[in-house]
Image (cartoon, helix red, strand yellow):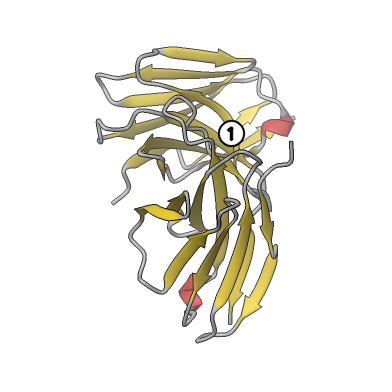
Amino acid sequence: QQQVKQSPQSLIVQKGGISIINCAYENTAFDYFPWYQQFPGKGPALLIAIRPDVSEKKEGRFTISFNKSAKQFSLHIMDSQPGDSATYFCAASDDYKLSFGAGTTVTVRA
Amino acid sequence: KAGVTQTPRYLIKTRGQQVTLSCSPISGHRSVSWYQQTPGQGLQFLFEYFSETQRNKGNFPGRFSGRQFSNSRSEMNVSTLELGDSALYLCASSLDHPTAKTQYFGPGTRLLVL
């Protein structure tokens, strides 16, 4: 049973556009929510992370929005670039164990 | 600071064999976790070690085991390999601090079971 549900499975966006990926969780014990970016043949790399006491966090073109009451969080990639084409995973952590979403493959068209 | 390193990067085994994978965490990181990544099941947590003790365990059969050494390096072992064990095995390390839970991943070991 997947503890973190992620959507969409894939998306295509034009260069300069906005990519939005959504995740939902049920376990209220989760206290840390990271997003990872993975390129083919590589391990996941941390992109940005948030704790449940914060509603939004921005780092460069990447923003996490967090809704604690709805148990949902999302990643927004602004001004998407071809180099952003990758698979993105949301995750949730409790007690140092990460539960991952199924992943979203993002393709940025030039 | 060097990142998480994993050896070997690629491995081909046959059913019934056993395999040992190695992970060296980032210097100073004492927590090491292992994950299995497959196209069908995604990223799944195997186990986590801290101070040479298994602290957390995922829902994998007993054929999957691991250990951690005093220098925080870790190994995982899979015995009696099955075709379904073909996957990318990822190791991640973290500082193990309540305010520093970030896990940093290595490049993974790609295991193919024939």
Q: Is residue A51 left or right of residue B17?
A: left
Most foreground residue, A62 or A98: A98
Which residue is most to the front? B70
Q: Is residue B45 visible to the viewer in this orientation of the structure?
A: no
Indicate the amino acid at tag 1. Answer: Leu
Look at the picture and state if A74 lies above or below B102. above
Most foreground residue, A7 or B82: B82
Categorize mark 1 by other alpha carbons within 10 Å: few (<14), some (14-19), many (20+): some
Q: Is residue A52 visible to the viewer in this orientation of the structure?
A: yes
Residue displayed at 66% across by 41% down: B27
Q: Chain of mark 1?
A: A
Look at the picture and state if B114 lies above or below A88. below
Look at the picture and state if B36 lies above or below A14. below
Residue A4, picture quadrant: top left
Most foreground residue, B79 or B73: B73
Most foreground residue, B27 or A92: B27
Measuring from the top left, give residue B78's x and y in whole percent.
49, 73
Where disc 1 sits, the SS reads strand
Residue displayed at 73% across by 32% down: A83
Residue position marked by numbered label 1 in the rendering:
A46
Q: Quadrant of the C terminus of chain B?
A: bottom right
Q: Is residue A23 left or right of residue B91?
A: left
Residue B105, picture quadrant: top right
Q: Quadrant of the N terminus of chain B?
A: top right
Residue displayed at 61% across by 38% down: B28
Measuring from the top left, give residue A84's x and y in whole percent.
67, 32
Q: Is residue B18 left or right of residue A24?
A: right
Measuring from the top left, give residue A88's x and y in whole percent.
55, 38
Tag count = 1
Look at the picture and state if A57 lies above or below B30. above
Measuring from the top left, give residue A109's x and y in whole percent.
70, 32
